[in-house]
Each structure stands twice: as C-alpha cells, then as structure tokens.
Image: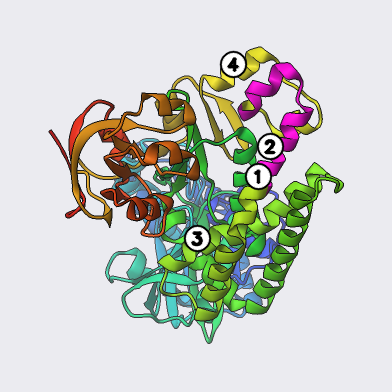
Amino acid sequence: MNYIVGDKEKLNADFGGKANSLLKLVENNFNVPRFYIITSKAYQEFLKFNHIESFDDLVKLKKEIEDANFPNTLEDEIFDYWEKYNFDKTAVRSSASNEDGQEKSFAGQYKTFLNVDKKELLIKIKKCWISLFEDNVVAYSNDISNQVMNVIVQEMVEADYSGVAFSSDPTGSSNNYSVIEVCPGLGEKLVSGNVTPTTMFVRRQTHHSDSITGQNYLTEEDISHLEQIILKIEEIYSIPMDIEWCTKKNLIYILQARAITAQNPSLNLYRKVISREKTIIETEIYYQGEYEGIKSLTKNLYYFKPLFIYDKEKEITNVYYNDTALEEDPKTIYYYMQKDIKKTKELYNKALSSCKYLNMIVDNEESDFNYKEFIKNMLIIYPFTSLGNLAGYFENISSELKELLIDFRNNYDYILYKANEYLHNKAKKILPKEYQEHIKFLFIEEVFQNKMPSLDLIQKRKNGYIFFDNNLELVDNIPLWLERKNIVIKSQQDGKIIKGSVAYSGKKTGKVCQIYTKEDFKKFEKGDILVTTMTTPKFTPILKLAGAIVTDEGGITCHAAIIARELKIPCIIGCKNATEILKNDMIVEVNANEGIINIS
C-alpha cells in the first residue's frame, strides 16, 4: 500500500488543509518548495501496527505514540522519498483534517519543525501526530475523536526574507489594499510573534506600496511581483487568502495559502460630495462616466462606486463617494496617468475629438442625432472633466499632467453641460404627452427606445430611490438598505458647529430659507439667509434678495463665491453640513468675517 504522496500527485483525496493547499498551488504552477506527504493512512497503519487504542487517556496515548516503532514497510517508504528528493534539511509540518478551514484555521495549534535532518525525521513525524492530542488543541476544537493527521516533509529554504501576506486587508478598513509583513531570515519568528515585522499596505490595483512601517527590505519590483502572485492566488481560490512566503536569491517561494478566517466585514464609508437636481438619465451617465470611464482610462483600475440617494422631500439627488475613493484613488489614478503620459495624451486627444463632435451636434439642429453615439462621446469626455476638477487638490501630480487636466476643465468642461441639456430636450420632444412631466424619472432606454414604464412605477420612483452599482432600487427604508449593504454615511462635521470658508466677508442676521429647486423660490423673501448645497445660474432671481449665502459645497471659484463677491453679499461656502443643521425659519447670524454661522 502507498502511504506517501509526492508533490506532483493530482489532488484526488483529502490530505488535510495544508497539504491540499500546497498541491493546489503546485498544480497552478506557483513556486513551492518540493515536498511529499505522509498520509493519514500511514498514521492509521502506525496506530494499528502498535495496537494503540488508548483514546480515553490522552497522556497514555501520547506516550505510546512517542515510544512506538514504525512498520518497516512504512519506514522504508518514508526514507525512499527522502532519497528520491535528495533532501538535506526539511520542514516537517502537520496537515490535520480540520486545519486551515474558512471558519477556523487551527493556526499554531499543531506542530511544525524546521531544519529537520534525516536522523530526526521519524521522531518529528511522531511529534506531529502527538500534537493532535495536546491540551491546546482539545480546548480549541472541543472534538478530536474523528481527527486524523497527514504530515508534510518539505524542502527547507534558508530564506533571506520571510513573511505573511493577506490578499485583502483583514481588518476590513479598506478593500483596496493587500497587507504584507516581512522580516529577515526565517518566518517562524514572525508567525510566533517574536519579532515586529515591517508592514506594507500594497494597493491591489497598482501593486505598489502606499505605506511602509519599519525598515523596507524589499525593492518596489519585489513588492510588485509578490503582490501579483498574492492576487493570482486569491483569484484561484476565489476568497481572500492568508499566504506564507519567503525569498532566497530574489526567488519568491510560496510556503502556504489558507483562507483568511474571521475577517472583519469591510465597512464602506461614504460621505456626501454634492446635492443636485438630477434626472435618472443624468445619474446613469454620471455613474458610467465616473466609474466605468475612469476604469477604462486607467486600464481597469478600480476607482469607486458612487452612491446616489434621491431625496423626495427636497426633490434633489445626494451623491456620495466612498472614503477610499476621495482620499486615495485620485492620487493613484494620477500616478497611473503620469506613468504612461503618452497614452494619456492619446486619450486626451480622443476626448477633444468627442468635444468637437458634441458641439457640432448641439449647434446644428439639422444634424443627424443618434442617442447611443451622442452618449458614447459624453462618456469619453466625462473622466477628463471629473479628474480636471480634482487635479488642483493634489501635490503629487506632475505639472505636465496638471496643466493638461486643468486646460480641459477651463476650456471644455461646459460642453458636458450643453450636451446634457441637449439630450434632455431631445427626450422631451419624443415623449408621449402623459410622460412629459415625468422625464426626471425615466431611464435612457425607456425614453429613446420607447419602453415607457407604467405611471404607477414612475410614482414609486418619485417616492424615493437609490442608484448604486448601476442599478436603481426603490427604497422605503434608507437606513435599513445601507445597513444591509454594510454602508456607513459619515457625518460631515461633528456636533452642531457650522464652519466654512469665507467667500465674501460681512455679517448678516436673518431667517433661514433652504432652496434646492425653482419650486422653492416662491417661499424666499428679501433678506432671508439662502442655505443650499450649491447655487447655480438658475438661482439668479433670488440671489439679489439674499441677506447672506451659506453652502455645503464649493471652493473660492464656485458659483456662490463669484456671485457673492459681485453682489457684495456675506457668503460662507464649503460648510459640509449646513443644510442638515440649519432648518427653515431658524434665526441665524452669518459671520462671514470668521467663517462661522451662529444659531440664535
């Protein structure tokens, strides 16, 4: 009977979590140190040969295993494989039937021995078997009656550096990073906690380290290569993985791969960036332009998934970005674009061609209009508009790229707005009369392919919806929906302190009037404090009446700031949560000398 399995065997039996995983890694052509497996059949034959049956008395059982001899045929087979592989020193590692599962890893519970020579081999194999019955295992498992043990005998790699890698951040703080720990020499001191390793957060999309704590032992090339291997392993297993690895003479060896157990669920932290009157058509284009467009611009680099929540009370759409997109991804995108500036310029020129096409269609009523082609060109220019608006916020962007993006923003940004207005005008002309007033709640294909939904469904959309991951959902209970999606909306500012940036100085006390749509204008009175997310040109009729202007959004060049300076109206911009705290008819003092709003 064969009691041994070599590392080239097909995975057609259960050899325990650790051994099964190693066989799978070899089968998929990863660089794994050579090994053979002393199977659980060998363990059972050993017990049978020595008449060991004392499972009710673990102390006696362990002593019997320690003192017993191997059957000659089994011993010969073990050493035949040793000679076949021409081993000098090995690692002898347990591979129990319950080890390295997705729920429990049994990490560190069973024995592993390093630098084992031929003379010590049989002793260490028995010690691996004995570790099935140690007190720590019994306490961890609660059930050892059906457990069996395979043992791996693996070529010992005298590593220059060793480490552990998590293909996805196990703390759940970000979906964008793998976490790699590394120390000089063998990894045993790392996994045993006897050394503080260097920790690296490596962005999954670019394979480059964004953060390193401790001495950096690896080159960027090494890190990039290791990250690619890590993600390939995750792809093969289809779950986030905990991977042991080492290097010797610049070669990377994979020593083990197991599922990450008890991984914290990743909280998707979102915060509001803008609130606008948006039709569903605009939302569709926004999503595809920002998410799909920027992915294609950066060779499928993950950017973010914007979240749109329609507020039926204010009749506006709140747009949220996930935190990692706001604070991390733009820098990575710019890095990617700078790295291949030639390709970026090619895409930029393509966007300019799309601008010319859109201008031609918009300015010529007689031109042929194909809505698919029209929207396709809108989506080509969308990423440059978006990235141009962000470019001024980051210092680590080359002057060449910054000038290109800001030039686009200054000279071509308006085309997207013209195109959007034109598209909606075209939609209105082809809509049946009974749907004219409902254009805000129709999809692109519903309008342009005459697939009108029922008026009942449109009414349900009017009652509130969420557009996420390119899908619109009718949602009655928004907090419950967010909880199910593991999404947390971050508050803009703590407490009730309202601060912002001064756009035009001065002081004014007055009554709050929140304005979002043209329908709100009728309630606005002269001297009121205009509170909104951001003003737009359509606010012109009431801006001259305002005693002061307060906005959630904006910088010194935003619409509200420019108009306030022209009209010499006290104005505080970028307050983030003014619309949440300042309610209609509140009496407040806008102190635009200090950038503070005081509630009476």
Kind of residue at disc 1 = Asn
Amino acid at circle 2: His
Q: Is residue 178 visible?
A: yes
Mark 3 lies on residue: 389
- In the rendered view, does 304 fall on the left or right side of 427? left
- Residue wearing tag 4: 459
Crowd tier of the residue under label 3, counting other residues whose Cα lies within 10 Å: few below 14, some 14–19, many 20 or above: some
Q: Which span is picked out in magenta?
A: 419-440
Q: Position of residue 296 (x, y in %)?
A: 67, 59
* Label 4 crowd (10 A; few <14 / some 14-19 / many >=20): few
Residue depicted at x 50% and y 75%: 223
Residue position for label 1: 420
Whole-number angstrom distance, CA of label 2 to CA of label 4: 20 Å
Please say if the residues under marks 3 and 2 sit with CB atoms less than 8 Å apart. Answer: no
The kind of secondary structure element at disc 4 is helix
Residue sitting at the far bottom: 249
Residue 424 included in the magenta stretch of the image: yes
Label 4 and label 1: CA atoms lie apart by 24 Å
Instruction: Calculate the distance from the C-alpha at mark 1 to the C-alpha at mark 3.
Output: 18 Å
The front one of 194 and 270 is: 270
Distance from label 1 to label 2 (Cα)? 6 Å
Image check: 506 left or right of 149?
left
Q: Nearer the viewer, residue 336 or 350?
A: 350
Q: Main secondary structure of the magenta part?
A: helix
Q: Is residue 587 above or below residue 82?
A: above
Label 2 sits on residue: 424
The amino acid type, in three-letter code, at marker 4 is: Gln
* Residue 275 horizontal side relative to residue 590, left or right: right
Task: Please determine whether, in this image, residue 146 is positioned above or below residue 296.
Answer: above
Disc 3 is placed on an element classified as helix
